[in-house]
C-alpha cells in the first residue's frame, strides 16, 4: 500500500486502584474515547455531525488527521493534485467522498481497501486521462460514481468497475472517450443511470457491441441518449448514437463466398497477365525506337 497512513491512537487512561478514584477514572476514559473518535477538526475545514467540509479553501494537499468517525468528506473546489496512499485507512465510517474540481490525474492503488461503506464518489472536473483496472478495488458498496467533465479522459480499462455490483449511477459524460469496452459495463447488473453524452464517439464497427447492450438495457437503464453523438466516421458525424441501426453496421458483417474468392483470384490473375503484357509491349517499343534512332544516325553519316 506504499507509505501507510498511521491512524492516531486513542490515549488510554492510567488505571487507578484507589476506590475513591474509580468513578473519576471511568468518566475520564469515556471522555477520552469520545474525543478520540471526534478528533480535532482540520485547519480551514468545518466539522459538524460527522460531516467534514474543506471545500473551496485553495488546498494543494489533503488535510491530515480527520475525525475518525467522518461520514461525509468534501474536498471539492481545491487544487489537490494527488492523494497519499492509504489516506482513507482510518475512516471506516466514510459514506460520501467529494473530490470534484481539483487537479487529480490518478488515485493511489488500494485507496478504497478499507472504505467498505463508501456509497458516493465524485471525481468530476479533474484531469483523469484513464481509469485503471481495479481503481475502485474493494469499494463494493459504491452506488454512484461521477467521472464527468474530465476532458482528457480517453480510456476506461475493461476491469475498471469490476466488483461494483451495487453501482446504480455512473456518469462518464463530457470527457474525451471515443470508445468504451462492453466488458467495462456488462458486469454492472444494478446500473440504473448511465451518462455518456458529450464525448467524441467513433461510431465504427467497434461501437456495435456497446450499442446493442445499451439498447437491450434501455428500459432498465436511463441514458442521456440525446446528448450522445457520433464524431466519426464522416458519414455519421453529428448523428445521435441511438439513431444508428443494424443497417448502419451492415458493412461490418460482410462475408465472402467461394465464388467471391474465385472472382478475386481471377481478377488478380487477369491484372497480372495484363501487367506482364504491357511491360512486354513497352520493352518491344523501346527496343524499336532505339534501333530506328541508330539507323537514322548511320544514314546521316
Image (cartoon, grey):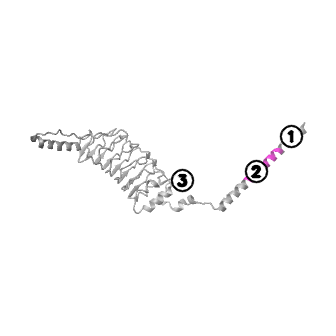
Residue mark closest to the camera, 1 vs 2: 2
Q: Earlier in the sequence, mark 1 or mark 3?
A: 3
Give the image quarter of residue 90. Answer: top left
Residue 274 magenta-highlighted: yes
Mark 1 closeness class: few <14, some 14–19, many ≥20 residues within 10 Å = few
**Looking at the image, residue 8 lies above or below residue 267:** above
The residue that mark 2 highlights is 276
Q: Residue 269 appears at what percent x and percent y?
A: 72, 55
Is there CB contact under 8 Å for labels 1 and 3? no
The disc at residue 64 is none
Label 2 vs 3, first from the N-terminus: 3
Q: Residue at x 47, y 58 (%)?
A: 211
* Rendered location of residue 161, percent (x, y): 41, 52
Q: What is the distance, in whole Å, between disc 1 and disc 3 at their CAs?
A: 58 Å
> How much space separates mark 1 and mark 2, taking CA atoms?
27 Å
Residue 93, position as x, y percentages in the image: 28, 48
Numbered disc 2: secondary structure = helix
**In this picture, which residue range is highlighted in magenta?**
272-287
Local crowd at mark 2 within 10 Å, few (<14), some, or many (≥20)?
few
Instruction: Tell me if I can see residue 240 in this picture.
Output: no
Mark closest to the chain's N terminus, 1 or 2? 2
Q: Which mark is residue 234?
A: 3
Amino acid at each position: 500500500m506504499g507509505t501507510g497512513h498511521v491512524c492516531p491512537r486513542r490515549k488510554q487512561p492510567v488505571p487507578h486502584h484507589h476506590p475513591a478514584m474509580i468513578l473519576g477514572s471511568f468518566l475520564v476514559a469515556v471522555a477520552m474515547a469520545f474525543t478520540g473518535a471526534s478528533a480535532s477538526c482540520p485547519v480551514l475545514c468545518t466539522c459538524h455531525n460527522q460531516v467534514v467540509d474543506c471545500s473551496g479553501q485553495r488546498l494543494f494537499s489533503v488535510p491530515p488527521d480527520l475525525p475518525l468517525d467522518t461520514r461525509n468528506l468534501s474536498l471539492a473546489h481545491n487544487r489537490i493534485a494527488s492523494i497519499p496512499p492509504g489516506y482513507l485507512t482510518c475512516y471506516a465510517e466514510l459514506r460520501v467522498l467529494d473530490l470534484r474540481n481539483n487537479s487529480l490525474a490518478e488515485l493511489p492503488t488500494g485507496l478504497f481497501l478499507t472504505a467498505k461503506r463508501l456509497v458516493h464518489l465524485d471525481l468530476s472536473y479533474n484531469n483523469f486521462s484513464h481509469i485503471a483496472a481495479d481503481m475502485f478495488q474493494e469499494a463494493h458498496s459504491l452506488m454512484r460514481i461521477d467521472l464527468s467533465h474530465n476532458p482528457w479522459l480517453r480510456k476506461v480499462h475493461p476491469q475498471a468497475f469490476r466488483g461494483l455490483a451495487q453501482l446504480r449511477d455512473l456518469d462518464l459524460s463530457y470527457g474525451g472517450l471515443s470508445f468504451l469496452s462492453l466488458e467495462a459495463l456488462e458486469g454492472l447488473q444494478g446500473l440504473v443511470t448511465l451518462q455518456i453524452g458529450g464525448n467524441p464517439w467513433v461510431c465504427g464497427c467497434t461501437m456495435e457491441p456497446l450499442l446493442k447492450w445499451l439498447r437491450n438495457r434501455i428500459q432498465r437503464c436511463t441514458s442521456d441518449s440525446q446528448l450522445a453523438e457520433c464524431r466519426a466516421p464522416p458519414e455519421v458525424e453529428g448523428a445521435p448514437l441511438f439513431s444508428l441501426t443494424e443497417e448502419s453496421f451492415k458493412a461490418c458483417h460482410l462475408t465472402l463466398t467461394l465464388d467471391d474468392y474465385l472472382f478475386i483470384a481471377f481478377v488478380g490473375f487477369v491484372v497480372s497477365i495484363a501487367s506482364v503484357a504491357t511491360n512486354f509491349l513497352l520493352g518491344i517499343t523501346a527496343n524499336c525506337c532505339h534501333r530506328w534512332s541508330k539507323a537514322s544516325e548511320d544514314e546521316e553519316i
